């Protein structure tokens, strides 16, 4: 999979989000603030044209697109 034009730091963010399933926990794990992680999610959503994650209660649930990206990340 090619990630042309994507800030590679966002791949670290999506990996943390897939692992932690929480914006705050993922941000903490890669030493970002929660607002910075939220901004990273917004940039990822724009780049991939998909929501990537939805909230179910207090947990982030990846969309099928995010699940498909996980092995490449």
Image (cartoon, helix red, strand yellow):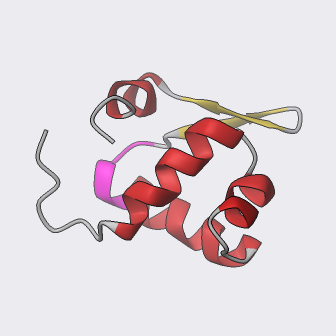
Kindly report the secondary structure that dominates the magenta region of the rendered protein: helix
x, y (%) of residue 4?
Answer: 11, 60
Q: Quadrant of the C terminus?
A: top left
Q: 38 and 12: which one is in front?
A: 12
Q: Is residue 2 left or right of residue 13?
A: left
Q: Which residues are magenta?
A: 46-50
Who is closer to the viewer here, 1 or 48? Answer: 1
Above or below 53: residue 56: above
Q: Is residue 4 magenta?
A: no
Please state the horizontal and vertical placement of residue 63, each as a whole percent of the image: 51, 28
- 27 shown above or below 65: below
Q: Answer above or below: position of 5 versus 15.
A: below
Q: Quadrant of residue 61?
A: top right
Query: Which residue sits at x=51%, y=67%?
Result: 40
Quadrant including the N terminus: top left
Residue 20 x/y as whole percent: 70, 41
């Amino acid at each position: 999979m090619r990630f042309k034009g994507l800030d590679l730091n966002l791949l670290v963010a999506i990996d943390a989000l897939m692992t932690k399933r929480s914006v705050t926990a993922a941000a903490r794990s890669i030493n970002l603030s929660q607002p910075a992680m939220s901004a990273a999610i917004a940039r990822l959503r724009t780049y991939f044209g998909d929501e990537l994650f939805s909230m179910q209660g207090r947990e982030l649930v990846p969309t099928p697109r995010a699940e498909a990206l996980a092995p490449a990340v």
